Amino acid sequence: MKQNLYDNPEFFEYYTRLRESKITFNDFVEQPAFRSLLPSLEGKRVLDLGCGSGQLAAYMLEQGAAQVIGTDISTRMLSLAPQHPQIEYIQLPMEELDFPGNSFDLVVSSLALHYIEHYEVMMQKIADWLKDGGQLVFSTEHPIVTAKLDKEGWIEDEGGERLYYAIDHYSQEGIRRAHWVVDDVITYHRRISTLINGVIESGLRIDAVLEPEPTAEGLEKMPQLVNELRKPSFVIIRASK
Ligand SMILES: C[S@@+](CC[C@H](N)C(=O)[O-])C[C@H]1O[C@@H](n2cnc3c(N)ncnc32)[C@H](O)[C@@H]1O
């Protein structure tokens, strides 16, 4: 099932304001680690799956990429993206994209693949789209986070102090429905082994796996990020063809 959450006006307004604050998990946990895994971008042709408002696309251009194709299911997110002659945007669910084989030097996807139902199919397509020697860098919500059904997550004492993070239903892969600003937000839970084996079975070679920790600046500006040292929120994988 494909859900276009980011075109929901209420969710879009919340998410846009959050990202504009620049005080987010993206700024201080996920993106610093993600960017640390990017190869040299000089002259590269890059595909960004689930590019959102194009911040990563713009960054990659600044770093010397020759061309970036940013794709996203959400019209509203793409309406925020910076226009540039070397960036082309495609508004489509990534499951429906079709490129010739050997098209890209680099495929990136930041925090979008947990919205995709058929992960292995997507991995196979990415592997085909990459040129020989090309690379994939993607992040997704950590399986520790996506596993939860209703009642797990942070368990707090009566004063609201976080005691521990409870996980259950880890092996029960598949759809999760949660409340995040709006009801019925759909993501897909996959075990860490499934994430890793999906890459391996596509024929790519895994080069690095990160479970990112907050930056020092992040810990200062968002003290609650100390909890990332107790429970990672994201996993980032780099692989090559
Ligand atoms: C958490 S945001 C991340 C945006 C961007 N990658 C970033 O890091 O700033 C997730 C993005 O994935 C997009 N998305 C969700 N499902 C998608 C799908 N099936 N195909 C393409 N994009 C999708 C959303 O519209 C949203 O822009």
Image (spheres, grey):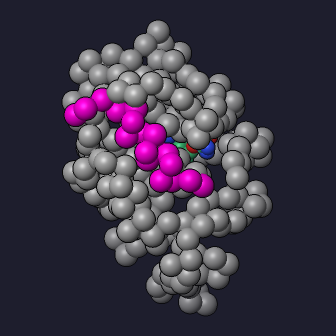
Residue 232 x, y percent position in the rendering:
39, 67
Residue 65 x, y percent position in the rendering:
32, 21
Q: Residue 195: which quarter of the image?
A: bottom left
**Residue at horizontal 63 percent and vertical 28 percent from the top:** 91
Which residues fall within the magenta stretch? 117-133
Residue 217 x, y percent position in the rendering:
33, 52
Q: Is residue 47 left or right of residue 5?
A: left
**Residue at horizontal 69 percent and vertical 48 percent from the top:** 2
Q: Is residue 112 left or right of residue 15?
A: left
Figure quadrant of the C terminus: top left
Q: Is residue 233 magenta?
A: no
Q: Does the magenta stretch include residue 130?
A: yes
The mark tally for this picture is 0
Residue 188 shows in this picture? yes
Q: Residue 194: which quarter of the image?
A: bottom left
**Residue at horizontal 38 percent and vertical 68 percent from the top:** 193
Q: Residue furthest top?
A: 85
Does 130 appear above or below 65?
below
Does 218 appear above or below 66?
below
Using the image as rendered, state which of residue 70 and residue 234 is in the foreground: 70
Using the image as rendered, state which of residue 115 and residue 53 is in the foreground: 115
**Residue at horizontal 48 percent and vertical 13 percent from the top:** 84
Q: Residue furthest bottom?
A: 158
Q: Which secondary structure class fits the magenta region best?
A: helix
Q: In this view, does 27 lie to the left or right of 158?
A: left
The image quadrant in which ligand 1 is located: top right
Residue 64 shows in this picture? no
Residue 216 x, y percent position in the rendering:
29, 56
